Image (cartoon, grey):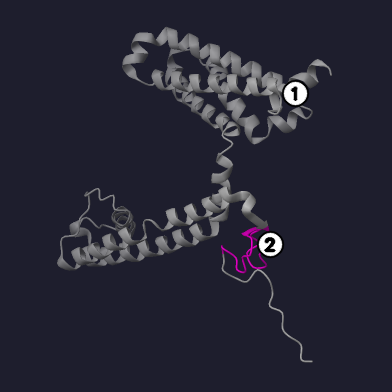
Amino acid sequence: MDTRQKLYSIIFHTDTPAGQRFDRYLLLTIMASLVVVMLDSIDSVHSQYAPLLAGIEWGFTALFAIEYVVRLYCSPKPLRYAFSFFGLIDLLAILPGILALFYADAQYLLIIRVIRMLRVFRVLKLSPYLRQANFLLTALRGSKQKIIVFFACIATMVTVFGTLMYVIEGPAHGFTSIPKGIYWAVVTLTTVGFGDIVPKTPLGQALSTLVMITGYSIIAVPTGIFTAELANAMRGGDELIHDCPSCAKNTHEHGAAFCTRCGNPLFPRQVDKPE
C-alpha cells in the first residue's frame, strides 16, 4: 500500500485504529477552534487577548488547510470531493483566513470581521462524527409528511386569525395590515406573547383568548409525531422491511397490518373465491 492509499485509509475510513485516532484528534481540533471563535467575539476578551487569539486562529487555519489539501491529494476523485457537501464545508473552514490575506488594508477591517464569522461553518464538520444523529435524521424523514401537513394547517390558521384581527381591531390599535395581524397570530399561537401588539376591543380579546387556547392545544403535536418516529428509528432491528403500497414507507413492526405513517393496509386483502 503506497502513501496515498494509506492516507486515504486514515482520513476517509473510520474502521481502523489509525482512522479512529485521526477522527478523535480532528474532532478536538474543531471544537477548540470553535471555542476560539466564540471567545474572540467577546469584546473584553478580544481587546485583551487579540494577538494571542489571532495566532491560535492562524494555527487552526493552517491545520485545516493542510487537512483539506491532503484530502484532495489522497481522494480517488478530487473534484468530486471538492464539490461535495463536506468538501465545501472544509473549504469554508479555511476560506476566511485565505481571504483575509487579500484584504489586509485598514479600510477593509469591517469586511474581514464579517468574513471571519464564516468560521462557524466548522461546526458542520462535526456532523460525520455524530453517529447517533442518524436516528434523528431517520425520524425527521419518517415524520416529514405529517409535519408538513401540520405546518400547512398552522399557516392557514394564523392567516385566518391575523385577517380577522385586522378586521376587528384595525390600524387604530396597531394592526396596520394583514401581515401585521399574521405576525400577532404567530406570536400568540406559539405562546411567546411579545406584547408589542395587543387587542383593545372585547371581540378582539375574545379572539386572542381562542388563539392562546388553540396554541396550548396544538403546540405539542409536532413533538409527539417526531418522538413516535424516533422511537421507531431506535428500535431498528425490531422492524420488518416492507414497503407500504400507499406512502412507500419501508420499515414496519413485525406483525403490523397497517402503515404507521399513513394508516393504509400493508397487504392487499385476499378475496375468497366461491367454491
Residue at x 68% of width, y 28% of height: 14
Give the number of the disc on residue 8.
1
Residue toward you, 242 or 108: 242
Magenta stretch mostly in which secondary structure? loop
User: Marks 2 and 1: in contact by CB < 8 Å?
Assistant: no
In the displayed structure, would residue 86 be above or below residue 139? above
Q: Name the quadrant containing residue 254.
A: bottom right
Give the residue at mark 2: 243
In the displayed structure, would residue 55 be above or below residue 226? above
In the shown orientation, is residue 102 left or right of residue 168?
right
- Label 2: element kind: loop
Residue toward you, 161 or 154: 154
Residue at x 59% of width, y 36% of height: 131
Amino acid found under the numbered disc labelled 2 = Asp
Highlighted range, magenta:
241-261
Residue 151 is situated, as x and y percent measured from the top left of the image, at 45, 58
Q: Quadrant of the C terminus?
A: bottom right
Amino acid found under the numbered disc labelled 1 = Tyr
Instruction: Specify the farthest residue to the right.
Output: 1
In the displayed structure, would residue 63 be above or below residue 166? above
The nearer-to-camera label among 1 and 2 is 2
Whether residue 181 is visible, yes or no, is yes
Task: Count all numbered tags in the image, as a single digit.
Answer: 2
